Image (cartoon, rainbow, N blue to C red):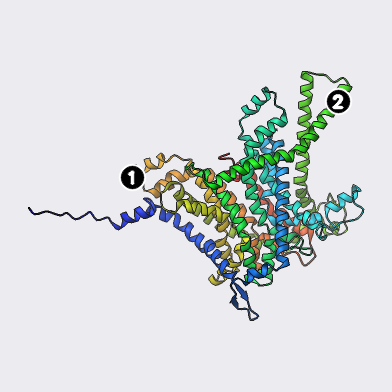
Amino acid sequence: MTSITYPLPQVSRWRRLDRILGRDWQVALPFIAPVVILMVAFIAWPLVEAVLISFTARTIRGEQQWVWFDNYIRLWQDPFYWQAVRITIVFTASCIILKFIFGLIAALAINAQVRGRNILTGLVLLPWIIPSVVQALTWKSIFDPLFGALNYILLELGIISEGISWLGNPRLALPAVILANVWAGIPFFTVNILAGLQSIPQELYEAAEVDGASEWQRFRHITLPGIRFVVLVAVLLSTIWTFNSFEVIFLLTGGGPAGTTRVYSVLTYQYGMIGLRFGPAAAIALTMTPVLGFLILLLSGYMRRDVSTDIEETWQTKLLSFLGRVIGFVLGLVLFPLRIIGNGLIAAIRAVRRAIGWQSGAARTSAHRRTLTLVRAATMIVLLTLIYFPFYWIIITAFKTELQITMRQNILWPAPWSLEQFRKLFFEQPFFTWARNTVIVTIFSTALSVSLSALGAYALARLRFRGADTLNAVLLITYLIPGALMFIPLYQILTNLGLINSLAGLIAVYPTFMMPFSTWLLLGYYRSIPEDLEHAAMVDGATRLQAFLKVTLPLTKPALLAVALFAFTSAWKEFLYAFVFIRSDNLKTLTVGMATTIYGDIYPWGLLMASALVISIPVVIIYMSAQKFMVAGLTAGAIKGG
């Protein structure tokens, strides 16, 4: 009998690729490829360049010489480096503690308001959205020893006998810089903690009150555990941002006096862009990456759990849960003195009531509630005064004449109101050129970021391909990469590409810090849309791209609007890259152009405040017109999993 052998079925090359790359890799490729190309070109490549540059040194003839680890060895012996590390830690820790305390107080006060809660939230958030250059120069004007508001108010109140140089005194400069950073960062904590407070079921408080729990017990055993994850995420994000702060510190003090405010990012700029010591500058930035890397990995583990269907615990989530409990315990200790003070005040009030024969029962309860209402109202008035005084200062200074400013007349109220500063801004400065450049860069970079984010997020949310989870985590990591690490290699890359000192260069690099967050926000929104809608369209003959364009994309309009708003405001107020990459006066953006009106130690405060007002108006209008989308985007992912 002759045996018949049949050839084994041949597995096609495409089938093998499907097994290796995932079933949807062919469909995902056009969606995800633009995102990957941009990330490789302007994030991965610069990171590799930064590492290579850190192993080089500039010779007398301007050539880059390979020196291996010499730059790192010299840093360990550099007193300026260790001073910068110490100041960075002190600055970051102080800012985070103060922002959290004031943010918690503001959130509790707003959450207690039944009426006007959304309005109060919007009012509190404004300092966070204005450009950092406006924040810095506003506070520099307030701190000015001759023309500033702070010395005038303290002198009038009799607290000081002579003007103080707040930013020129080595002992006071760092606290002044911390104050400016805290002022701008309180809204972020307030909005996120408020989101956490509103996610706690009211029934828990009602049940605790029925059981006889005091307000402090309800706060400690219900409120603190309920917001610990929100606080943890807010603390991690704010720590990373504060650790990498550059613009406000650089514009306020330039790192002085005597290096007392020189954080590592300012030292990196001074070594790299001023001293042209690119190798040591890159080494400084890279030595900070282990700290940032740990924080970023910790945060990415938690945030990835938020948007993932995999409920398996990771080391990040376990550590975050432990840190959440630690934070709750520490908060109880920190707030314990406040409890003692509060109990003392309550005891004193009760003693006074007994002495004057105060009524009991319903009248007593009603009086207690009125007292709490008055305390909350007073707290909100104080907070809003502190938050909005800098805005008031911008407005009144912008409408003063030069004579009123120099002669220190009518410090807190223009008399008469004048448009002199605006005439100088519009007709003596290239304001409209700066505005044109800003509009061009903002519109094109926003369109590019939103388009790529919409495509990339859809692929990550809907399609199955190898590397999707890794890319998901990388997006968050790239969003948090410090600008101090990126601007030196990006400067050299843009120079090699012929894009330095051009608007095209800014349009190319801006999506590197706009696209990752936009993708994350859209990712969660896509996953909330039922896939059955797309499947029905594809059953009717639509391709995956047609289903995306005609079914899914129209349903994501609210999220697209939030993403576009964030991208627009981020591009509008960006300073660092525009400051480093642009040299020609006719290519400068509004934020950089505003800073260049300063000549040495001469600050045209009226002109600067008029510029600050004009620059902030578009951002404020956009924010106020779409406040709910901005707040939703700001708190995206913060309360999930908690």
| Residue displayed at 79% across by 24% down | 367
* Secondary structure under the numbered disc 2 in the rendered image: helix
Residue 274 appears at what percent x and percent y? 69, 70
Q: Which residue is mark 2?
A: 351
Residue 603 appears at what percent x and percent y? 79, 62
Q: Nearer the viewer, mark 1 or mark 2?
A: 2
User: Are the residues at dot 1 and dot 2 in contact (C-beta closer than 8 Å)?
Assistant: no
Amino acid type at circle 2 is Ala
Tell me if I can see residue 627 in this picture.
Answer: no
Q: Which residue is mark 1?
A: 541
Q: Earlier in the sequence, mark 1 or mark 2?
A: 2
* Secondary structure under the numbered disc 1 in the rendered image: loop
Q: Is residue 176 left or right of residue 616?
A: right
Residue 598 tag number:
none
The one nearer the camera, 235 or 250, is 235
Q: Residues within 10 Å of mark 2 (few under 14, many from 20)?
A: few
Q: Quadrant of residue 256?
A: bottom right
Q: Is residue 113 left or right of residue 290?
A: right
Residue 452 appears at what percent x and percent y? 49, 54
Vertical side of 350 occupied by 577: above or below: below
| Residue displayed at 67% across by 68% down | 75
Amino acid type at circle 1 is Gly
